[in-house]
Amino acid sequence: MRRLSNRVQQIKPSATLAITAKAAEMRAAGKSIISLSVGEPDFETPKAAREAGIEAINSGFTRYTAVAGIPALRQVIAEKFKQDNDLDYSADDVLVSTGGKQCIYNLLMAVINPGEKAIIPAPYWVSYPDMVKLAEGTPVIVPTTSEADFKITAAQLDEVLCPRCKILFLNSPSNPTGMVYSAEELKAIGDVVRKHPDLLVATDDMYEKILFDGKTFATFAQVNPDLKDQTITFNGVSKAFCMTGWRIGFCAGPSVIIKAMTKIQGQSTSNPNAIAQKAALAALTGPTDELEEMVATYEARRGWLVDALNAIPGMHAIMPDGAFYVFPSVENWIGRTTSSGIELTDDVVICEWLLEETGVALVPGTAFGSPGHVRFSYAVSQDTLEDAVSRIAKAAASLT
């Protein structure tokens, strides 16, 4: 058997996808399964986007496009950054990729040299550390706490930065916590970044449009305009416009970096899907009433779920600011024993037990760099949420 590369042996499969696959296997075997593990909106892609995709097919818009995306879409994205974030970019400063994940991968491959470091606050989106490893960089994980709303502080950042640090990841609203950095917090982080002119800030704003309680979104370069040339801002249509399967993400930043990222993309996947680009163009320029309805629905589910989880002995959840996740602590369950005699040694075992015992699929906090927690996605119906919580509460009551 041929030996696999050291590169691929360093990385782990996506925990989210692995749990989703396990839940699907159990469902196929006839078990009643509720999956709260996948981060995918349960609403339809907006009508305007669906119709634009159909029109693209019918009109023969099914061939290669420019590697960085069609000019019309890149221009609309540049206008989106100006309108929503007060960031001035030209279409040439924009790259469209096969999802936000590819944008981030392109960046890492374009700027990280072997052994250079990437600062990743934990909890983090599961793919950040492994993508850094694929680029032969070194992830530097900075733990955060629920008392700090799971956000890195300027003081923490100042303490860990060194000359080998190349990138700082920021994700707001966060996957998995749903917490949002305020403009004041981003300004304080900016004060630290200014002392490190070679540091890039990779800000993942994929959940920008899913905000609650009337909060106003701010992105890093918006509140630190003098650091715009040290910032790459990522976004996409997957979450706000329910277009996960269409695979369209985008980013904007300094032209020299965007050109380098485009070069990487040109030698890996080439252009993003032509039909999906037309659909994304329609989504970004179309009406927002479906988005507003979705956000209102998520806000109501969020409040119900946090209250319901905090009513279960041993669970503790803080109220998220956005996205569609709750990230409760289950540390008080660790060391306890289930009715079938299983000792709950960590959050991974807890998620395995819950899946087998209750049929509810969750993602362990360990996958996000924060052991002792689990992630709930509430991108499911209210009835489904209530069924899931009822099952979990019944199982929790049997712990000894």
Image (tube, rainbow, N blue to C red):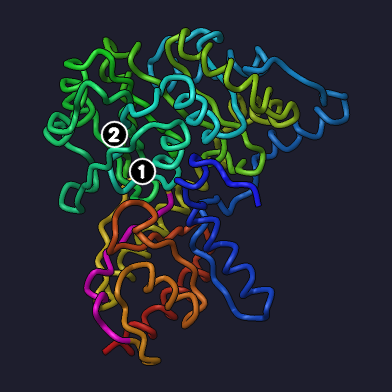
Whether the magenta-drawn stretch holds residue 335 is answered as yes
Range of magenta residues:
324-337
Q: Position of residue 165 (x, y in %)?
A: 27, 25
Q: Position of residue 70 (x, y in %)?
A: 68, 16
Q: Quadrant of residue 137?
A: top left
Crowd around label 1: few <14 · some 14–19 · many ≥20 (10 Å): many
For the image, the number of numbered tags is 2
Marks 1 and 2 sit apart, C-alpha to C-alpha, by: 16 Å
Residue 326 left/right relative to 103: left
Report if the CB atoms under discs 1 and 2 are less than 8 Å apart: no
Q: Magenta part mainly helix, strand or loop?
A: loop
What residue sits right under mark 1 in the picture? 174
Crowd around label 2: few <14 · some 14–19 · many ≥20 (10 Å): many
Mark 1 or 2: in front is 2
Is 145 placed above or below 263 here? Answer: below
User: Residue at point 57% right, 42% down?
Assistant: 290
In the structure shown, which secondary structural element does the residue marked by tag 1 occupy? loop
- Quick one: quadrant of the C terminus? bottom left
What residue sits right under mark 2 in the picture? 119
Whether residue 311 can be seen here: yes
Q: Position of residue 21 (x, y in %)?
A: 60, 63
Q: Position of residue 80 (x, y in %)?
A: 50, 20
User: Residue at point 53% right, 16% down?
Assistant: 94
Residue 253 left/right relative to 236: left
Whether the magenta-drawn stretch holds residue 182 is answered as no
Give amino acid for label 1: Ser
User: Residue at point 14% right, 29% down?
Assistant: 158
Whether residue 212 can be seen here: no
Give amino acid for label 2: Ile
User: Residue at point 19% right, 28% down?
Assistant: 161
Residue 285 left/right relative to 337: right
